[in-house]
Image (spheres, grey):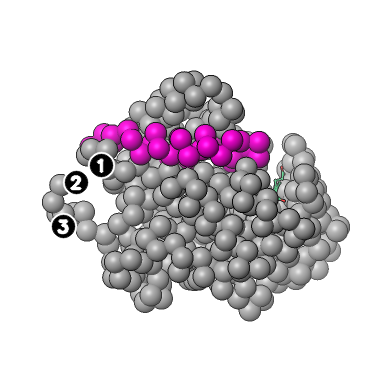
């Protein structure tokens, strides 16, 4: 690495973050500000490329299956000791450059008092789907005190992580509403897509509710010590760009607005915000413009193509190309090593086109993945020199 120039100094963190927050503290063993993840999200090229995996905690790890034995998914998300242990497991095992908070996108629904379960092998299932104006009007608001269990788990986890940043997350309003309207996982998300056209006022009320609980969930995690946060709009790819722009983007922007004094592109030194979807290559600039610092890219387009599309459609704030995250095809984790290695090297080369690159999968780790393959991918990523700077 070259000598520190003023241009390389991290910007000062906003005073809305607590003084002992990892982005604000000057304590060497606790500050995350110069970590590879934070640097890449600021648009720099750290000599060690940051890599983490969506769903890196979970069923691919035997140590996860062991500690979860006999404990329900949502129940485990509400036990800070378990949350800390499960969040740390993949960091210990794989040497990834970030931890992702172990929780689920429906945790804030449960904390608000919505009847929701996570059924093994299925996913989130509601006691009753939320379909009508009356159903939406009856939704309880999320009391701030209910988030104390999340704050406690984040703080305990961050204390263990030291200089490795914790990424907080929430579900985007469309993806949350997709579960709420259907009452369970679905393939085509006809329920929410019908509702936004058939009854736009009810849709807006539901998406507005989801934006509030997700915004509160994000805020609790960032205040308690998360150094970055990701909004998962996993199912937004079932929308047209026009529907996304009119019926979804304003609500995702409202989620981000909940943390506007702590995070996002308008807050230098705050927590960077990542915005992820699958099948969203047609409207990546709209996802950036919802208020994200960086966008996730799935396997359908290359990172270089994603950067080209972002650069070609700057937002009102003038931002074009922004840092990107992705996009190793999870299907290839089961391919022979030579095939996977060649693919990872292509992803790294393509990522050189971006102002910053956070290496990740194009979607979550499949449960049947051999964890040793993930460890090997991390070693490979860390061994490849970045465009500027060496491999050290
Ligand atoms: O019993 C189990 O082990 C349940 C499996 C599981 C796990 C490990 C679920 C149920 N959720 C989680 C944790 C989880 N969920 C994390 C933290 C772990 C990590 O990333 O390392 C995160 C970030 C999520 C977020 C999440 N939940 C998303 C967005 C990410 C994505 O993969 O697109 C979504 C869509 C959900 C809903 C959900 N929860 C669980 C399942 C199986 C699903 C998907 C259901 C479906 O297919 O619709």
Mark 2 lies within 8 Å of ligand 1 (Cβ measured)? no
Horizontal relation, residue 355 to residue 223: left or right: left
Q: Is mark 2 on a helix, strand or loop?
A: loop
Q: How many marks?
A: 3
Do the CB atoms of the residues marked 1 and 2 lie less than 8 Å apart? Answer: yes
Q: Is mark 1 on a helix, strand or loop?
A: loop
Horizontal relation, residue 210 to residue 264: left or right: right
Earlier-in-chain disc, 1 versus 2: 2
Q: Could you tell me if residue 49 is visible in this image?
A: yes
Residue 313 rendering spot, x and y as whole percentages: 41, 37
- In magenta, the rendered stretch is 359-388
Quarter in which the C terminus is drawn: top left
Say which of 2 and 251 sits in front: 2
Residue 1, label in figure: 2
150 within the magenta span: no
Q: Residue at x 57, y 69 (%)?
A: 153
Q: Nearer the viewer, mark 3 or mark 1?
A: 1
Earlier-in-chain disc, 3 versus 1: 3
Horizontal relation, residue 56 to residue 338: left or right: right
Say which of 244 and 216 sits in front: 216
Horizontal relation, residue 347 to residue 184: left or right: left
Q: What element carries label 3?
A: helix
370 within the magenta span: yes
Q: Residue at x 74, y 36 (%)?
A: 188
Which residue, given by chain and number where applicable, does mark 3 sit on?
6
* Quarter of the image where one finds residue 45: top left
Say which of 248 and 383 sits in front: 383
Which residue, given by chain and number where applicable, does mark 1 sit on?
392
Q: Nearer the viewer, mark 1 or mark 2?
A: 1
In three-dimensional space, the C-alpha distance between marks 1 and 2, rounded to whole angstroms, equals: 8 Å
Earlier-in-chain disc, 3 versus 2: 2
């Amino acid at each position: 690495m070259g000598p520190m120039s003023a241009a390389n100094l991290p910007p000062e963190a906003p005073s809305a973050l607590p003084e002992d927050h990892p982005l604000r503290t000057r304590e060497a063993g606790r500050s995350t500000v110069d970590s590879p993840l934070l640097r890449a999200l600021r648009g720099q090229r750290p000599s060690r490329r940051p890599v983490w995996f969506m769903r890196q905690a979970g069923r691919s790890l035997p140590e996860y299956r062991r500690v979860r034995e006999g404990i329900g998914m949502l129940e485990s998300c509400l036990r800070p000791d378990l949350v800390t242990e499960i969040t740390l497991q993949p960091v210990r095992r794989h040497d990834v450059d970030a931890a992702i908070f172990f929780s689920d996108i429906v945790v804030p629904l449960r904390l608000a008092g919505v009847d929701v379960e996570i059924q093994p092998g299925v996913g989130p299932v509601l006691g009753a789907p939320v379909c009508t104006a009356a159903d939406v009007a009856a939704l309880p608001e999320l009391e701030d005190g209910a988030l104390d269990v999340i704050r406690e788990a984040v703080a305990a986890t961050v204390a263990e992580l030291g200089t490795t940043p914790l990424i907080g997350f929430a579900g985007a309003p469309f993806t949350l509403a997709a579960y709420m309207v259907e009452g369970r996982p679905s393939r085509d998300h006809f329920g929410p897509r019908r509702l936004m056209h058939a009854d736009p006022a009810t849709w807006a009320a539901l998406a507005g509710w989801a934006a509030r609980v997700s915004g509160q969930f994000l805020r609790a995690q960032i205040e308690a010590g998360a150094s970055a946060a990701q909004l998962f709009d996993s199912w937004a790819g079932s929308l047209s760009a026009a529907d996304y722009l009119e019926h979804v983007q304003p609500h995702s922007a409202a989620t981000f607005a909940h943390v506007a004094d702590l995070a996002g592109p308008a807050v230098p030194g705050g927590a960077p915000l990542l915005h992820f979807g699958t099948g969203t290559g047609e409207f990546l600039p709209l996802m950036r413009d919802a208020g994200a610092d960086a966008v996730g890219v799935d396997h359908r387009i290359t990172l270089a193509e994603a950067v080209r599309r972002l650069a070609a459609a700057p937002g009102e704030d003038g931002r074009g190309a922004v840092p990107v995250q992705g996009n190793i095809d999870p299907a290839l984790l089961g391919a022979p090593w030579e095939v996977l290695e060649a693919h990872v090297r292509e992803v790294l080369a393509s990522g050189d086109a971006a102002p910053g690159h956070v290496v990740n999968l194009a979607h979550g780790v499949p449960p049947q993945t051999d964890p040793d393959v993930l460890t090997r991918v991390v070693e490979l990523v860390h061994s490849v020199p970045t465009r500027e700077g060496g491999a050290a």
